[in-house]
Image: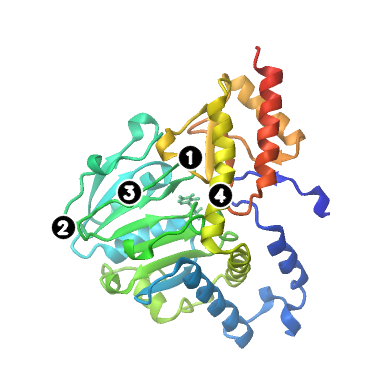
Amino acid sequence: MADKRIFNFSAGPSMLPEEVLRTASEQMLNYKGSGMSVMEMSHRSSAYDQIIKEAQRRLRALLQIPDNYKVLFLQGGASTQFSAIPMNLLRSGSADYVITGHFANLAYKEATKYGAIQVAGSTQEENFSRIPTQEELQLRKDADYVYLCSNNTIYGTQWKYVPQTQGVPIVADMSSDILSRTIDVSQYGLIFAGAQKNMGIAGVTVVIVREDLLGFQLAGTPTMLNYQIMADKDSMYNTPPTYAIYILGLVLEWIERQGGLEAIEARNERKAKLLYDYLDSSTFYQAAAQKQDRSLMNVTFCTPSKELDALFVSESIKAGMSNLKGHRAVGGIRASIYNAMPMEGVEHLVAFMKAFEATNGGR
Ligand SMILES: *Cc1c(COP(=O)(O)O)cnc(C)c1O
């Protein structure tokens, strides 16, 4: 069965390390002698208590999360946080949003239901092909928070700097680049990420929030969206997404075995460089994102025509690769090369791109 696996370039849900899938399959029927699957376990059992605590411990160690931050394992996907963030953090009623793509825009629109939300910067007119510079940002000193999306999954851009905000907490959607590089958590007020891009499977959303920001939720905030309650209950107010948290734990363990985030980051840089260097050397392919802001996770590009883009995608499937079709907002091709994508997958793609260019370049 394993020999039939293909290189899956999906933007999310996306590929998992094969070792993680193997461990999960070995433990499927009988988790560590418990006589049952993790799927069948009470979330209040001691076996499960260990799973969730270990997942949190590993995440804290890998990201070096300071003690004054809470880690929450929530449900509803990253999109639910688009509502929970303003409900919990709008203590005086205003926030600044930087619009760098589809998901930042959705978060902005949702937040406008709850307060005086301002666009602090946007690259929409350039089809989100870059990230605004610090100088372009219009930030209010008295905003409750500044919102940004650290990696724009659809457009293939990534923040390469953390903006100066004069003490205003930064809220970052890291759904598609969390654990891909080292970060300084203390530069953020809140970090959140759905697991299914780079951390595991759909079902769990991680929220990392500075303690002093808790307790100011708007009246009427639903209990399930109330960070203070979820923090007080250690994410166990109700049944947490038990299996997704277990898989997250296995992925974190795998990252440790790779040498931690420094090693993962170095490997991600090598993978992306191979692809971008080839794109830059080719007159056939055109990269979508501007050079200085290119994502190391989602590489967006196109061939000279829509017809060739479509042919590229259909031929790539025959060559053992899947999900290379770009999002309709950008068109062309998108290769998502998250942590679990091995170097061989990127080498395979580049070899295919060269052959495709050689065959179709003269048209
Ligand atoms: C996928 C994605 C989302 C949406 O995640 P859901 O879990 O489907 O709600 C939000 N933000 C970013 C950056 C994403 O890549």
Callout 2 crowding tier (Cα within 10 Å): few <14, some 14–19, many ≥20: some
Q: Is residue 268 left or right of residue 321?
A: left
Q: Mark 1 near ligand 1 (CB under 8 Å)?
A: no
Between discs 4 and 1, the one toward the N terminus: 1
Between discs 3 and 1, the one toward the N terminus: 3
Residue hosting label 4: 268
Residue situated in front as seen by the camera: 115 or 297 = 297
Q: State yes or no: discs 2 and 1 in contact (Cβ < 8 Å).
A: no
Residue hosting label 2: 142
Q: Is residue 332 visible?
A: no
Q: Mark 4 near ligand 1 (CB under 8 Å)?
A: no
The type of residue carrying mark 4 is Asn
**Mark 1: which secondary structure?**
loop
Q: Is residue 318 left or right of residue 221?
A: right
Residue 359 percent location from the top left of the image: 71, 19
Residue drawn 50% across the image and 51% down it: 176
| Mark in front: 2 vs 4 | 4
Residue hosting label 1: 156
Question: For the residues marked 2 and 1, what is the alpha-carbon distance in whole angstroms?
Answer: 31 Å
Question: For the residues marked 4 and 3, what is the alpha-carbon distance in whole angstroms?
Answer: 30 Å
| Mark in front: 3 vs 1 | 1
